Image (cartoon, rainbow, N blue to C red):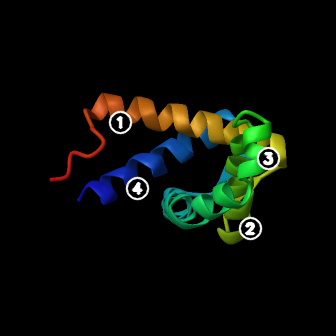
């Protein structure tokens, strides 16, 4: 049940972030749900692999390369989901920041806690 709530919260955050950033477009709520599902998959499977493969550059940049990985995951999601469009790396980076902040605020407002499985 927690997974479904997290996907719904992320989908709402995707809509909010897309409405605030002119370089990001989402066609509908269904599209934002697909984006949330793809991002969940990417963050669970692809991001750990990329993080391990890029440990040297991540250490050299004091962790800032993880921001590049986040933006890359957003751009890859753009290619995988029809109706979701990001106009370049910098918009993907801004979208990643705003999505994280918006999701955090929505979770705080809902009283959602990590690790609180129901």
Gap between marks 2 and 3 measured at Cα: 25 Å
Q: How many marks?
A: 4
The residue pinned by badge 1 equals: 107
Gap between marks 4 and 3 measured at Cα: 31 Å
User: In the rendered view, would you say 71 is above or below 77?
Assistant: above
Q: In terms of sequence position, does the residue under pointer 1 or pointer 3 come before the other?
A: 3
Q: In terms of sequence position, does the residue under pointer 4 or pointer 3 come before the other?
A: 4
> Quick one: label 1, few (<14), some, or many (20+) residues within 10 Å?
some
Q: Nearer the viewer, residue 77 or 45?
A: 45
Report if residue 94 is visible in the image.
yes
Point out which mark residue 7 bears.
4
Report if residue 92 is visible in the image.
no
User: In the rendered view, would you say 22 is above or below 118?
Assistant: above
The reply to whether discs 1 and 4 touch (Cβ–Cβ < 8 Å) is no
- Percent position (x, y) of residue 65? 75, 42
Q: In terms of sequence position, does the residue under pointer 1 or pointer 4 come before the other?
A: 4
In the rendered image, which quarter is residue 111 located in? top left
Q: In terms of sequence position, does the residue under pointer 2 or pointer 1 come before the other?
A: 2
- Percent position (x, y) of residue 63? 69, 37
The residue pinned by badge 3 equals: 57
Q: In the structure shown, which secondary structural element does the residue marked by tag 1 occupy?
A: helix
Q: In terms of sequence position, does the residue under pointer 4 or pointer 2 come before the other?
A: 4
Point out which mark residue 79 bears.
2
At a point 42% along the width and 29% down the height, the residue shown is 105
The reply to whether discs 2 and 1 touch (Cβ–Cβ < 8 Å) is no
Q: In the structure shown, which secondary structural element does the residue marked by tag 2 occupy?
A: helix
In the rendered image, which quarter is residue 61 located in? top right
In the rendered structure, the answer to whether residue 7 lies left or right of residue 53 reads: left
- Percent position (x, y) of residue 74? 68, 54
User: In the rendered view, would you say 30 is above or below 96?
Assistant: below
Gap between marks 4 and 2 measured at Cα: 20 Å
> Quick one: label 2, few (<14), some, or many (20+) residues within 10 Å?
few
């Amino acid at each position: 049940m927690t997974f479904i709530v997290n996907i719904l919260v992320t989908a709402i955050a995707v809509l909010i972030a897309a409405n605030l950033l002119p370089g990001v477009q989402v066609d509908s709520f269904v599209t934002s749900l697909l984006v949330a599902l793809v991002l969940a998959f990417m963050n669970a499977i692809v991001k750990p692999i990329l993080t391990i493969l890029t440990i040297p550059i991540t250490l050299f940049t004091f962790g800032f390369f993880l921001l590049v990985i986040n933006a890359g995951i957003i751009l890859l999601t753009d290619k995988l989901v029809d109706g979701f469009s990001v106009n370049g790396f910098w918009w993907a980076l801004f979208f990643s920041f705003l999505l994280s902040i918006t999701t955090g605020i929505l979770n705080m407002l809902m009283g959602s806690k990590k690790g609180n499985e129901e």
